[in-house]
Image: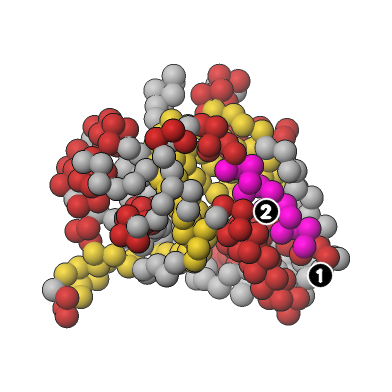
Amino acid sequence: MSQVTIPKGYVSRLSLYQTQKAIEVLRNAFQEEFRRELNLVRATAPLFVETDSGLNDDLNGVERAVEFDVPAAQCNAQIVHSLAKWKRMALHQYGFLPGKGIYTDMNAVRRDEELDNLHSIYVDQWDWEKVITPETRTMDTLQATVKSIVQCIVDTSEKVKLHFPAVNTKLNRKVFFVTTQELEDRWPEKTAKQREDAITKEHGTVFLMQIGGALKSGKPHDGRAPDYDDWALNGDLLFWDELLERSIEISSMGIRVDAESMGSQLTTANCDNRRKYPFHKMVLDGTLPLTMGGGIGQSRLCMLILGKAHIGEVQSSIWDENTHKICKDAGVALL
């Protein structure tokens, strides 16, 4: 059963036609700002990868990938969950130098995703990755990049409002940086999601750092695969949504594992069996470049900036009967 709630009295500020036009303006504006600010070039990315390559994102380790056989290639393939590992391999194969990187339109299917206002089984992101050096593999680099992305998002929002004056979303350019342990120390009685909402309501724009490892309570704030982000150098970018009165995660990103952090995290997560995969071997032996990267949710960003109550207003997906009924009763048009 889905968990969908539509705010009382909600009416979209844009018609269906205006919404489609606004999505076009928003996506074009953001890509241009983002590409220029982070020194990225667009790359073509796969919809699926070979099962035995180890390139698929394992997310929290329990989600089932959509898998199928490819008789002509005599292998099995999986539709990607994300391109976290593929991008790093691509930078190696393409010979990118430090300071340069790629971004791509990533389309994924997450069959086990819970359905609510923010979640769909269809995922669309701008996935990005760039090469860094040992000297720039630091928290300062991560935070500076976060600030740049936030500026791109806020500038995009302002451009959209010039074209569509009915849109009145207000986003905070100033980013508040905080660690998951600092949130647990402050609100030990709250759940992880409640902590995220509380801190984002206070500051508007938050980058929540160090996700994946166990906190003092013995539990991680949230799950992270052990083989792409360094759990000490990653985070989620959150914005406060006044309409839904909750935080919205727009991006998950981080500095990627080096040989030391991958080895440690694989053991901690009881995933040492992954050391056999080609990708993991290339990280552990230092073949792959040091990189940082992440994903920026396209539909999530459209939803936030355009002031939409449900992600189905900005993307076409599959919804259960309960979602269709609640949205229809509230006058919310799902694409």
Amino acid at dot 1: His
For the point 15% across and 47% down, which residue is it?
A: 276
Name the quadrant containing residue 110.
bottom left
Q: Is residue 308 visible?
A: yes
Horizontal and vertical percent for residue 119?
A: 53, 57
Asked if residue 157 lies in the magenta stretch, the reply is yes
Asked if residue 253 lies in the magenta stretch, the reply is no
| Helix, strand or loop for disc 1 | helix
Amino acid at dot 2: Ile
User: Please, is residue 70 above or below residue 144 in the view?
Assistant: below
Residue at image mark 2: 153
**Main SS type for the magenta part?**
helix
Residue range (magenta) = 145-159
Residue furthest right as drawn: 165
For the point 61% across and 58% down, which residue is it?
A: 36
| Helix, strand or loop for disc 2 | helix
User: Please, is residue 198 above or below residue 66 in the view?
Assistant: above
Residue at image mark 1: 163
